[in-house]
Amino acid sequence: MSASLVTEVAPKPPLRGITAGKLLQTDYPPRQFAIDPWLRTGESALIWAATGVGKTWLTLSLALAMAGGGRVWEWKSPKARKVLILDGEMNVQDLQERISHLVSSGAVDGLDREAMGNNLLLMPRQYQDPRAQFYDITDPASQERILSEMETSGAEVIIIDNLTTCADGLADENDATAFRSIMGFLLMMKQAGKTAIVVHHANKSGKDARGSTALEATFEVKLGLERPPVEKPGEASFVTQFGKFRGQGNDSLRPRVWTLKDSGWDVQDDTGSADGRVLEAIRSLKFTNQAQVAQALGMVQSSVSKALKRCVILGMAKQDEIERLFISARSLSSVAADPTGAEDTMVTEEAMEDF
């Protein structure tokens, strides 16, 4: 074979190790927030919602805030960063109209428009030549192209909207092994110090992300946008629900109803949230353990445990208060002490891992 036809493969960098001594002596800079208080630099987040709920509206708002150092409601971007958006389905004119509305309506407060204009780079699929090969985050060669584009442009954040239209090689969303290449891409972003947000569709129930749960292992944050009890046609409206979160957080992470109006985002307390219903049930002193609460509310016990963990993290209740309420409920119902019952008042290990 002619030497000119042989394609040389660039050698991969060698793997590196670090001793415990050097690790302990290394002075790492403090982690910064890309979105305060729930997404730090180098982390990844999954935002899921049903079609038409408003996930792209929220994602674009967050992108504008990060690119222009602004704020979306109480979620702040402390500094302006370069942001790359891979959009797999929206018409360019729709993107133009949405960004124009978000900027003019004040949906992003404190926005540096000049910085945003320079820092936000959009790569819409519908903007490309029909014969151009768009990015596919399941393909190793495409992953390298994305990383190179980010390094060349200086982008610190990548937003993939959405998973289905930017992952042509994903044959079966319900197959856990099919997600390995995507998990590898997200880990590559972490290794490069990049922040990643992946937008995905909800499953048929509208209560969780579509496809295998294997993908969740890679994300530090999982934010669901559920349909509100009362929908208004033509308005982006949803209830935020953090299903996974590994930071400290604050009160802004509680479930709330978001609605996009002419004057920007309107955010109200969600009085009917699952967290609030679980806490209200326990405070009623009618239930002696989490299993009873789950049965009464039509939930699985692990969801009750996760809801209680969120309540503790967000300051809605204290762990010792929850335990005392279960003890009081047992006393009122004259239930004999059960050595396994005490554990059922605690947050489960599964919930601890998720948060």
Image: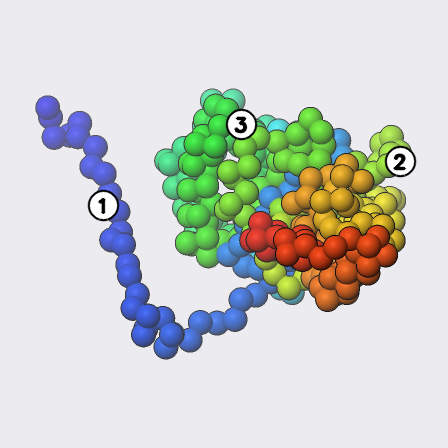
The part of the image, by quadrant, that contains residue 38 is bottom right
Secondary structure under the numbered disc 2 in the rendered image:
loop
Judge left or right: residue 186 versus residue 308: left
Q: Mark 3 or mark 2, which has the lower sequence index?
A: 3
Instruction: Tell me the residue that label 2 is attached to.
Output: 230
Q: Residues within 10 Å of mark 1 (few under 14, many from 20)?
A: few
Q: Residues within 10 Å of mark 2 (few under 14, many from 20)?
A: few
The image's mark for residue 11 is 1
Question: Considering depth in this image, is 329 or 187 the residue closer to the camera?
Answer: 329
Between marks 1 and 2 in the image, the one whose residue lies nearer the viewer: 2
The image's mark for residue 167 is none
Is 309 drawn above or below residue 5 in the view shown?
Answer: below
Please say whether residue 141 is visible from this viewpoint: yes
Secondary structure under the numbered disc 3 in the rendered image:
loop
The image's mark for residue 174 is 3
Expressed as whole percent of the image width and height from the top left, the position of residue 51 reads 71, 30
Asked whether the beta carbons under mark 1 and mark 3 sit within 8 Å of each other, the answer is no
Expressed as whole percent of the image width and height from the top left, the position of residue 164 reads 56, 29
Secondary structure under the numbered disc 1 in the rendered image:
loop
Question: Considering depth in this image, is 323 or 205 the residue closer to the camera?
Answer: 323
Q: Which residue is depicted at the point 69% across and 26% down?
A: 204
Expressed as whole percent of the image width and height from the top left, the position of residue 352 reads 59, 55
Kind of residue at badge 3? Asn
Q: CA distance from mark 1 to mark 2?
A: 57 Å
Between marks 3 and 2 in the image, the one whose residue lies nearer the viewer: 3
